[in-house]
Image (spheres, rainbow, N blue to C red):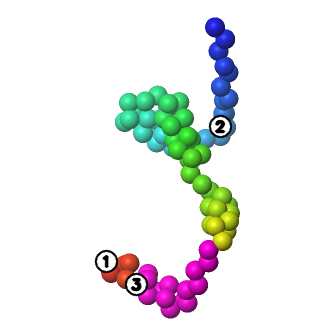
Amino acid sequence: MHTVSMPNVLIRDLPPEVHAVLAQRAEHNGQSLQQYLTQELTRLARKRDNAELTAAISARGDRISLSAEEIMEAIRRGRSE
């Protein structure tokens, strides 16, 4: 049976305190560090970054025009709720 080689990622110069936090989170979740990082990187890759999100919004073509005062009022209402 032929096994497919999965891509690997090597991260150099990771600060020890970052490694410790990630290892602790992995342990807390009952996972190896590799399993935890694979899960987190997969979650990160599924999220759109700002450029992708901006492109998707621009592609929709719908425009909403709000004044600065309307925006500020919406923020005030949201904060008061």
Q: Is residue 66 above or below residue 37?
A: below
Residue neighbourhood size for the residue with mark 2, other residues' Cα within 10 Å, grouped as few (<14), some (14–19), many (≥20): few
- Of 9 and 68, the residue lying toward us: 68
Residue drawn where x is 51% and y is 41% of the image: 40
Q: Is residue 79 above or below residue 5?
A: below
| Position in image of residue 45 (x %, y %) | 59, 45
| Position in image of residue 17 (x %, y %) | 51, 43
Which residue is tagged 2? 11
Q: CA distance from mark 2 to mark 1?
A: 43 Å
Q: Are marks 2 and 1 in contact (CB under 8 Å)?
A: no
Direction from residue 77 to residue 53 in the image, left or right: right
Tag shown at residue 9: none
Check disc 1 and report its element: helix, strand or loop: loop
Give the tally of numbered discs. Answer: 3
Nearer mark to the viewer, of 2 and 1: 1
Whether residue 38 is visible to the viewer of this picture, yes or no, is: yes
| Position in image of residue 57 (x %, y %) | 62, 66
